[in-house]
Image (cartoon, rainbow, N blue to C red):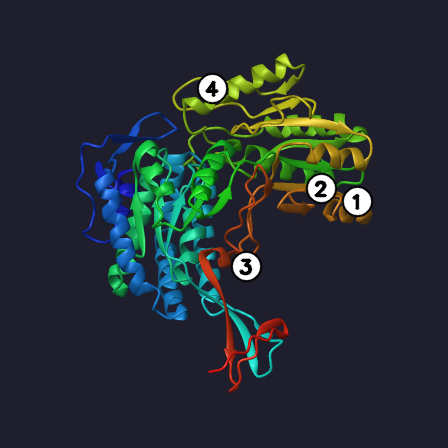
C-alpha cells in the first residue's frame, strides 16, 4: 500500500484544496475525511477538508487562469491534454491500484478506468482541431453568416465514488481543449483518488508552464458543494450521482440560469429473446451485474427473458454466480470486490427485504460475507417489474429476472422504469434488434445489440434520458456544452439591407 501512496504523492495527512504545484490549502479546522478501504475497513490516509476561504481562493485563481488559457490556440491546448495522457500511461499501474484500494473495484477494472482516462485524452487531442462551426447563407445580398464556439469559463465537476477518476477526465480533458478551467469536487468516499490526480496535473502543468487549469476542492457538501452549485462564476456544473442529488443540483443551477450536465441513476435491463445465443448472454449478464459489485450506473439490474428460456437461464446464471471469487480487489484472481461502505451493505439488505415483502423470491445469494470489509454475495431475484423496489436503483449486485411472452411486452417492461440510461437486447432476429433500436424500442440513451449494458466506449456520447438526467459527456458532439455558441453575420456590401425585407428609411 505504501508503494502505491508514495508513487502518487499521497501522505498520511493531505490537504483538500489545490490549484497547482506548491499551492495547496493549509486549513486544518474544516473537518477531516478518513479514507477507508472497503476491502478491510482500515483507514488508508486522511484529508483535511477545505474551507470556504479555500474555495474562494480556488475560484479566484481559476478565473485568472481562464483569462489566459482561453487565448491559447485550441491545438496547443490539445498538446497539454496529450501530455496528461502520457503521464497517465506512466502512472496507470499505481493509479489503477489506488482505485482498487480506495473504491474496491478489482484491479483489472481499476486499470480499465485509468485506460478510459488515457483514451479520452487521445480523443480530446483530436477534438482540439475539430471545434467546428457552420457557415450559412444569408437572405441579405452580400452578407454571410457563420457560427463559432468560444470558451465558456469555469466548469464545476462533481463526481461519484464508483468512477473516482475517469468521470473527471471525461469532463476535464474536453473542457481543457475547449479553453475552460475545471474545478473538481470528488466524492468524499474516494478523496485520495482526487488528490492523486491533482498531483499528476500539477506535475504536467508545471513542466509545460501552465497553472490553474485543473483544480481540486474536497469539502463538505453542505458548505463547499452548495457554494459551487450556487456560484454564478461557475457557468457549467457537471454532476454524476443519484437522481435525488441531480434534481437538487439541476434546480439550483437552473435558478441562476446556469448550465448542467447531469449523469444520474440507471436501472438497466437486458432483453433476452428466444433466438439469443446463451454462450454470449451469460457472461454479458455476469459482468454487467457483478462487475464493480453492481456499483456502476450502467450495471445490469433487470433481465427480461423469454418465458421459454427462463428456467434454463436461471440455472446457467446460478452456476456462473457460484464461480465468482469474492475478496481482496488487489488480488488478480478476484472477480468481485466489496461494496463501498456499510451504508451500501445496509441498502443491499434493505432491498432484499423489500423484494421479499412484495412477493419476490431470492434464487441465489442474498447474504453478507462474514469477516472484514463490506462484502456481499451477488444475488439473483425472481421478481416482477411492477415491484416498487425493482423501480428503484440499488447500488449493489442484485439482479431481477422477469419473464415475458412477446417482444412488445418485453419492451414495455424494459421502458417501464423511471430511469433511462443503458439497455441491451440479445437476439439473432434482425426484426427484433431493429425494433429495439427504433422509435418504439428502448427509451435509453444507450441501446446495445448482443453486448451488455455495462461500460461505455469512448467516442459515443455517454448519458441517458428520463431520471438519468439527459446529460451527455465524453464523446460525439458533447464538447459543445463546454462552450458558448455565437452566430455572426458579416456585411461585405456598402448597403444596409434589413432582414425579412423590412424597410426602415430615414434621412441621414
Which residue position holds label 4? 346
Q: Judge left or right: residue 351 versus residue 195.
A: right
Which residue position holds label 3? 477
Quadrant of residue 2 in the image? Answer: top left
Residue 374, how many percent across, how many down?
43, 24
In the image, farthest residue toward the front: 507
Residue 33, how many percent across, how many down?
28, 31
Q: Judge left or right: residue 94 versus residue 388.
A: left
Label 2 – label 4 distance at C-alpha: 32 Å
Please report whichever mark, 4 or 1, sits nearer to the chain's N-terminal start: 4
Label 1 – label 2 distance at C-alpha: 9 Å
Question: Which residue occupies the foreground of this view, 84 or 275?
Answer: 84
Label 3 – label 2 distance at C-alpha: 26 Å
Name the front one of labels 4 and 3. Answer: 3
Q: Residues within 10 Å of mark 3 (few under 14, many from 20)?
A: some
Q: Is residue 94 visible?
A: no
Please report whichever mark, 2 or 4, sits nearer to the chain's N-terminal start: 4
Amino acid at each position: 500500500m505504501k508503494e502505491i501512496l508514495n508513487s502518487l504523492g499521497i501522505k498520511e495527512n493531505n490537504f483538500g484544496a489545490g490549484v497547482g504545484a506548491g499551492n495547496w490549502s493549509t486549513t486544518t479546522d474544516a473537518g477531516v475525511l478518513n479514507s477507508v478501504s472497503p476491502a478491510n475497513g482500515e483507514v488508508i490516509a486522511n484529508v483535511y477538508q477545505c474551507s470556504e476561504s479555500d474555495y474562494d481562493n480556488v475560484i479566484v485563481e481559476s478565473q485568472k487562469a481562464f483569462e489566459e488559457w482561453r487565448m491559447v490556440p485550441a491545438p496547443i491546448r490539445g498538446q497539454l491534454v496529450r501530455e496528461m495522457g502520457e503521464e497517465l500511461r506512466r502512472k496507470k499501474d499505481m493509479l489503477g491500484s489506488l482505485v482498487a484500494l480506495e473504491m474496491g473495484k478489482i484491479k483489472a477494472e481499476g486499470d480499465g478506468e485509468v485506460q478510459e482516462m488515457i483514451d479520452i485524452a487521445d480523443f480530446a487531442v483530436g477534438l482540439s482541431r475539430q471545434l467546428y462551426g457552420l457557415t450559412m447563407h444569408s437572405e441579405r445580398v452580400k452578407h454571410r453568416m457563420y457560427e463559432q464556439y468560444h470558451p465558456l469559463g469555469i466548469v464545476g465537476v462533481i463526481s461519484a465514488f464508483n468512477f473516482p477518476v475517469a468521470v473527471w477526465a471525461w469532463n476535464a480533458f474536453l473542457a481543457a481543449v475547449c479553453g475552460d478551467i475545471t474545478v473538481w469536487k470528488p466524492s468524499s468516499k474516494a478523496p485520495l483518488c482526487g488528490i492523486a490526480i491533482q498531483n499528476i496535473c500539477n506535475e504536467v502543468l508545471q513542466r509545460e508552464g501552465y497553472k490553474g487549469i485543473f483544480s481540486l476542492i474536497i469539502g463538505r457538501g453542505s458548505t463547499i458543494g452548495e457554494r459551487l452549485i450556487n456560484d454564478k462564476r461557475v457557468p457549467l456544473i457537471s454532476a454524476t450521482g443519484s437522481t435525488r442529488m441531480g434534481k437538487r443540483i439541476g434546480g439550483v443551477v437552473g435558478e441562476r440560469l446556469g448550465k448542467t450536465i447531469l449523469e444520474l441513476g440507471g436501472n438497466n435491463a437486458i432483453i433476452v429473446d428466444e433466438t439469443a445465443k446463451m454462450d454470449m448472454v451469460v457472461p454479458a449478464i455476469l459482468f454487467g451485474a457483478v462487475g464493480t459489485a453492481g456499483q456502476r450506473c450502467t450495471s445490469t439490474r433487470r433481465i427480461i427473458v423469454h418465458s421459454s428460456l427462463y428456467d434454463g437461464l436461471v440455472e446457467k446464471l446460478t452456476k456462473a454466480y457460484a464461480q465468482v471469487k469474492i475478496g481482496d480487489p488487489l488480488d488478480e484472481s478476484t472477480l468481485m470486490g466489496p461494496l463501498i461502505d456499510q451504508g451500501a451493505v445496509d441498502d443491499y439488505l434493505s432491498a432484499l427485504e423489500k423484494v421479499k415483502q412484495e412477493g419476490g423470491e431470492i434464487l441465489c445469494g442474498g447474504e453478507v460475507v462474514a469477516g472484514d470489509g463490506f462484502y456481499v454475495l451477488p444475488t439473483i431475484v425472481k421478481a416482477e417489474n411492477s415491484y416498487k423496489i425493482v423501480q428503484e436503483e440499488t447500488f449493489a449486485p442484485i439482479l431481477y429476472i422477469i419473464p415475458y411472452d412477446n417482444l412488445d411486452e418485453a419492451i414495455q417492461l424494459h421502458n417501464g422504469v423511471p430511469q433511462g440510461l443503458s439497455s441491451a437486447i440479445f437476439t439473432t432476429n434482425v426484426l427484433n434488434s431493429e425494433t429495439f433500436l427504433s422509435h418504439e424500442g428502448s427509451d435509453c440513451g444507450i441501446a446495445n445489440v448482443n453486448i451488455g449494458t455495462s461500460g461505455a466506449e469512448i467516442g459515443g456520447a455517454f448519458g441517458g434520458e428520463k431520471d438519468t438526467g439527459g446529460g451527455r459527456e465524453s464523446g460525439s458532439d458533447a464538447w459543445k456544452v463546454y462552450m458558448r455558441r455565437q452566430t455572426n453575420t458579416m456585411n461585405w456590401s456598402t448597403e444596409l439591407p434589413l432582414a425579412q425585407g423590412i424597410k426602415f428609411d430615414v434621412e441621414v
